[in-house]
Image (cartoon, rainbow, N blue to C red):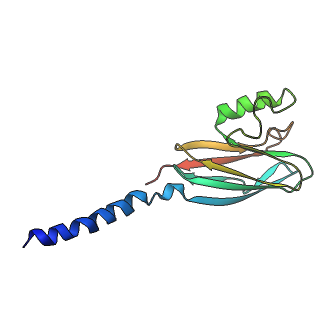
Amino acid sequence: MRTLPRLLLLPALAMILAACSTGDTSREVRTVVVSMSDEMRYDPAEFDFFVGETVRFEVTNAGSLRHEFFVSDVAGHEEHAAEMSGGGHGSMGADEPGLVSVEPGDTESLEYTFQAAGELMAACHEPGHYEAGMVAPISVHPRS
């Protein structure tokens, strides 16, 4: 008789375990609205995220100049700056992960998943913009 109640619990336990394994909250997408201005600033001016978090940046260019929103580490920004100094986007185009170029008055979306804890930044490498301070720090924190 004791075996029958245990057997009845097995399907319930299997359903609970299946629900837990498919409840991946790291795939939830949080939307963050970003504004860029000709004062060479981002609003918000800094960002905090968690490892595994996917963010959809809705980036609006409120200025009259083209601006970029490029998410990367220091090495990625140095590489992109070198390509931009050549008078264009070099090999980085619209399909480059972590990069959107936004024309005046437009809004573009960028979906980005933060893979590791550490410091990144968003920056614009249009000529003179980075040097004028168009940079926003991004802190990526481990999940506790």
- Residue 124: x and y, percent? 78, 42
- Residue 123: x and y, percent? 74, 43
- Residue 40: x and y, percent? 83, 48
| Image quadrant in which you'd find residue 28 | bottom right
Residue at 66% across, 50% down? 111
| Image quadrant in which you'd find residue 82 | top right
Along the viewing direction, whichever of 11 and 80 lies nearer the viewer: 11
Along the viewing direction, whichever of 40 and 86 lies nearer the viewer: 86
Lateral position of residue 129 relative to residue 53, left or right: right
The relative height of residue 51 versus residue 18 in the rendered view (above or below) is above
State the quadrant of the N terminus: bottom left
State the quadrant of the C terminus: bottom left
Lateral position of residue 1 relative to residue 119, left or right: left
Residue at 59% across, 58% down? 29
- Residue 142: x and y, percent? 48, 49
Q: Residue furthest left?
A: 1
Along the viewing direction, whichever of 76 and 29 lies nearer the viewer: 29
The relative height of residue 131 versus residue 79 in the rendered view (above or below) is below
Lateral position of residue 103 relative to residue 10, left or right: right
The relative height of residue 95 versus residue 84 in the rendered view (above or below) is below
| Image quadrant in which you'd find residue 95 | top right
Q: How many callouts does the rendering have?
A: 0
Q: Residue furthest right?
A: 64
Residue at 85% across, 55% down? 106
